[in-house]
Image: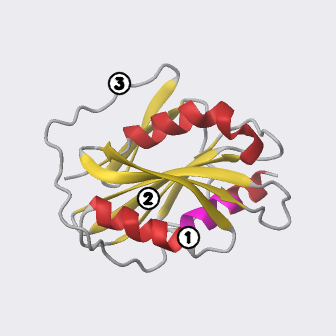
C-alpha cells in the first residue's frame, strides 16, 4: 500500500518536471517585507539542497531514489492512501510567478488532473500561485487524491512543493497542507 501511495506522489511530482514556458504578464518582484510563518505545533523543519519547509513531525521518508524528488509520507493511511509532501526541482530561469503560471498551464492539459482553484499568494516573499487539483487514481490503486502545490524559482532553479491527500480526506488535511506550502522557502 505504501508503494501505491509513493507512486501517486511520485507521478504528481513528475508532472512538475514537464517543460514549462514563461509568464507574459509583467514583473512580480520579491516582497522584501515578507515574514516567514511561525512553526506550527507538532511540526518539524525539513531541509533539502537550497530549500526548507515544515511538515508534521511524524511523517517519514519513503526511501525513494529519484534525486530530483524529495518526499515524506504520513505513516497512517486514510482511505488506503498515505498523505505526502514532495519537493521537485528542475532548471528554470525566471521568477516564481512565471514558473507557477507555466505549471498551471501544464496541469490544465493533464487528462488525469482537474485544477479546482488557483489563487495568488506570497510564499517566501515571492508572488506565486497556490493551486489545488483533483487527480484520478493511478492503477492499481483506486483512490483519487487532491493536491495543494506552490512554485518558487531562484538562482536558475524551479521548485514545486506538493501536498497530496486522499480526495475524501483533503478537508481534514487542509490546514496541514496550508502550513507545509506556506512554510516553503528557497535559497536566495
| Marks 1,3: beta carbons within 8 A | no
Specify the label residue 108 is tagged with: 1
Q: Farthest residue to the left: give it.
A: 32
Residue 77 placement, left or right of 109: right
CA distance for labels 1 and 3: 33 Å
CA distance for labels 2 and 3: 21 Å
Q: Which residues are magenta?
A: 8-14
> Which percent across, then down, holds residue 39?
40, 25
Mark 1 vs 3, N-terminal side: 3
> Which percent across, then down, holds residue 48?
39, 51
Q: Main secondary structure of the magenta part?
A: helix
Image point (24%, 63%), residue name: 95
Q: Farthest residue to the top: give it.
A: 41
In this rendered view, identify the residue nearer to me: 150 or 115. 115
> Which percent across, then down, holds residue 155?
21, 64
Specify the label residue 38 is tagged with: 3
Does the magenta segment cover residue 36? no
Specify the label residue 160 is tagged with: 2
| Marks 1,2: beta carbons within 8 A | no
Residue 69 placement, left or right of 10: left
Q: Secondary structure at mark 3?
A: loop
Mark 2 vs 3, N-terminal side: 3
Mark 1 vs 2, N-terminal side: 1
CA distance for labels 1 and 2: 16 Å
The image quarter in which residue 99 lies: bottom left
Amino acid at each position: 500500500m505504501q508503494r501505491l501511495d509513493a507512486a501517486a506522489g511520485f507521478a504528481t511530482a513528475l508532472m512538475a518536471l514537464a517543460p514549462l514556458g514563461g509568464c507574459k504578464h509583467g514583473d512580480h518582484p520579491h516582497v522584501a517585507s515578507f515574514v516567514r510563518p511561525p512553526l506550527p505545533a507538532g511540526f518539524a523543519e525539513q531541509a533539502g539542497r537550497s530549500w526548507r519547509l515544515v511538515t508534521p513531525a511524524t511523517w517519514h521518508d519513503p526511501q525513494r531514489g529519484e534525486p530530483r524528488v524529495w518526499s515524506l509520507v504520513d505513516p497512517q493511511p486514510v482511505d488506503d492512501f498515505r498523505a505526502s509532501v514532495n519537493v521537485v526541482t528542475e532548471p528554470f530561469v525566471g521568477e516564481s510567478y512565471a514558473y507557477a503560471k507555466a505549471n498551471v498551464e501544464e496541469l490544465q492539459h493533464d487528462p488525469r488532473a482537474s485544477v479546482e482553484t488557483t489563487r495568488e499568494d506570497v510564499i517566501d516573499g515571492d508572488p506565486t500561485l497556490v493551486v489545488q487539483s483533483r487527480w484520478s487514481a493511478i492503477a492499481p490503486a483506486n483512490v483519487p487524491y487532491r493536491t495543494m502545490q506552490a512554485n518558487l524559482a531562484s538562482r536558475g532553479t524551479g521548485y514545486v512543493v506538493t501536498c497530496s491527500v486522499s480526495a475524501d480526506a483533503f478537508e481534514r488535511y487542509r490546514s496541514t497542507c496550508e502550513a507545509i506550502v506556506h512554510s516553503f522557502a528557497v535559497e536566495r
